[in-house]
Amino acid sequence: MGRNKKEQKSGGRLTKKQIIKRLLDLFASEPEREFSVKEIFDFIHAANHPAKMLTMDALSELVLDDYLTSDNKGNYRNAVRSNVMEGTFQRKRNGRNSFLPDDGGKCILVCERNSLHALDGDRVKVTMLARRPGHTREAEVTEILQRAKDTFVGQLQVEKGFGFLITESRSLANDIFIPKDKLKGGKTGDKAVVKITEWPDGAKSPIGKVVDILGKQGENTAEMHAILAEYGLPYTYPANVEKAAERLSPDITPEEIARREDFREVTTFTSTVYTAREFCLMAPKSLGEKSLVIACSHSGNTQEVVDGCEMALAAGAEVVALTDCEGSKIDNGKWTTWVYPWGEGVPQAEVPQGIGALIAAELLDQQEGYEALADMYEGLKQMDALLPAAREKVNAELGARFAELCQQHKFFYILGSGPNFSQTYAMAICSLMEMQWQHCCYIHSGEYFHGPFEATEPGVFYFVQLGSGECRPMEKRALAFLNTHTDTVMVLDALEYGVGEVPASVRSYLEPIFFYNMSCELRAARGKVFDHSPEVRRYMGIEQY
C-alpha cells in the first residue's frame, strides 16, 4: 500500500490512529483470514522497533475492544461470534454488568437496562447488540437459564403493610420487597433469610418471602447463623444430631494422648524480626518475662532502638543490646550490652551477623541440642578465610561494571531470597540509597512472579544475589526469565566465590555475611566513580524527622 504525501512529509511515520484504521481495513478485506504478526508488520511497513511497538499497541487495543482475537502465539483474526450465546452473568453494583461466554471469550458488557434482572452467577442466554462506533461491545440478556442463588440474608425493614430485606450481597443490587403476609412475624432490625419468589418485568425490586428469622441484628448467635446461611451452610441440626453431640466428651483420653507427640512439658520458643519503630508501635502480645529481646544499634544512639529496649525491660523481658559505641545511649547499664569491634580484619564471629548466628545456635543447643553447633563456629572461621579473596575477585570482575551500570541506569532492581534477603534489603536501603543516594528497589525472588516481573523489559537493570542454599532454585527461576526478557542483568553467585566450602548445615545462615561484604565493595566501587563517600549524609542526623 502506497504512502500519502502527508506521511512522506512527516518522514513516513504513522500515528496510532492511522495504524488502527489500516488494521481494520486489512481484516475487513479478508474477514476469514488469520494474519501473523510478521505479516501485519509487513503490511504496516513497521520496519523499526518504535513502529513495531506502536503496531503491537494498536493490536492490543483492538483485541481489548473485541474487534480482533489473538491465539497468544502472534496470530490475529476478526472477533467473530454468534449473535446468540450462553454463559455466566456477572453482576456489578455500578450497573456495568458483564457476560462471560461459555466459549471462554472476553467478558461482554451488559448494562442494567438489558440485564433482565439476572443475578451474579446466573446462567443466561444473551443476544449481541449492534455495535456503536467508539463504544464497547454490549449484549442483552434474553433468558435466565438457571439461577445461581435465590435465597439471601440481610436485615429486615418493616413498614405498615410490607417490608424489605436489605442485603449486603454483591450479587443483588436491589432490596427484596416482602408482602405483609410473607414476613413470618419479622420486625425491623431482625436478621432474616429471604427467598425470591418472582421478579416481574418492570419492577425495580424482586418479591420474596421470609424463610427464617435468625434473631436481632448484632446478636452473636444471629450473626453466626447469618454467615452460615449466606454461604448455604446448615445452621440448625436435627434433634438426634444435637443429642449425639452432647454425649461427646471434650476430654482427651489416655489412649489418644499415647498416639500424639506430647509437648506439654517441653520448652519451646518462637522468634520474630522487627524494625525498632515497628516493635515500639506494635509490641508482640507475647512480650513478657519469658521473652529474650536482642537489639542492635551500630551507633548506639538510634532512639527507636533505645525506646524498644526500655519497653521490653518494663515488660519483664531479658534484653541484650549490640553496639559499636561504648558509652552510647544504649550502653547505659540497664541491660546486657555487647560492645563489638568494627573495622578491617575483625573476625566475623565478633560482629553483629556472626554474633546473631552464634546466639541462635547456642540457644538451640542449650534448649534441645544443636548438631551443627561446631559447624557454625567452623563456618564463621571459613568465612574469615574466604572473604579477602572474594573481595578482590568481586572488585576485579564486577566493581567497574557495576559502577558503569549505575551511571547508565538511574534506577534498578535487586533480587534475592531466603536468609540472604536480609542483605538484598540492606544493599538497597543502606549501601545504595542511604550511602550512595542511588535509586533502587529490592524484590524477593519468590515474589518476582507475583507481579514485579510484569515490569521487566529491555533496558531495565537487574542485580541478582544468587545464593548456594535451599532457595537457589527460586533465584535461578527468576534469573532464567530475566535472561530472556531484559538485556541488563548482573549476577553475584556465592558459589563462584568459595562459599560452597562452608559446611552445608550452616551455609544458608552464614551466606548473608558474604553478600553484606560484597555489597560494601560494590558500594565503594560506585562511590569512587561518582566521587561520593559512603559517610556523606544530607538528612540523617542533620534534620529533624
Image: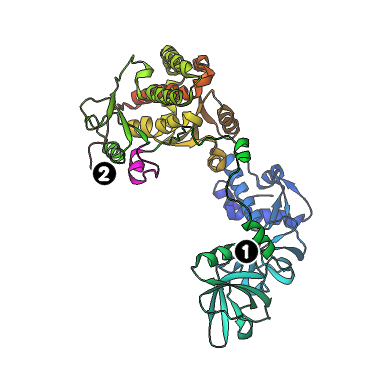
Which stretch is magenta?
A: 275-289
Question: Is residue 499 on the magenta stretch?
Answer: no
**Location of mark 1 (residue):** 235
* Res 530 quadrant in image: top left
Mark 1 crowdedness (10 Å alpha carbons): few <14, some 14-19, many ≥20: few
Up the image or down, 478 lies above or below 29; here it is above
Residue 344 at what x, y percent from top left? 32, 16
Determine whether label 1 and label 2 are within 8 Å by CB: no
Q: Is residue 448 left or right of residue 211?
A: left
Amino acid at pointer 1 = Tyr
Magenta region, main secondary structure:
loop
Residue 254 at what x, y percent from top left? 60, 40
Question: Is residue 288 on the magenta stretch?
Answer: yes
* Res 186 quadrant in image: bottom right
> Residue at point 41% right, 36% down?
273
Is 355 in front, or is 527?
A: 355
Is 217 in front, or is 84?
A: 217
Mark 2 crowdedness (10 Å alpha carbons): few <14, some 14-19, many ≥20: few
Up the image or down, 276 lies above or below 524; here it is below
**Location of mark 2 (residue):** 545
Which of the image's four quarters has the C terminus?
top left
Up the image or down, 26 lies above or below 88; here it is above
Q: Is residue 500 left or right of residue 539?
A: right
Amino acid at pointer 2 = Tyr
| Residue 134 visible to an observer of this rendering | no
* Res 318 quadrant in image: top left
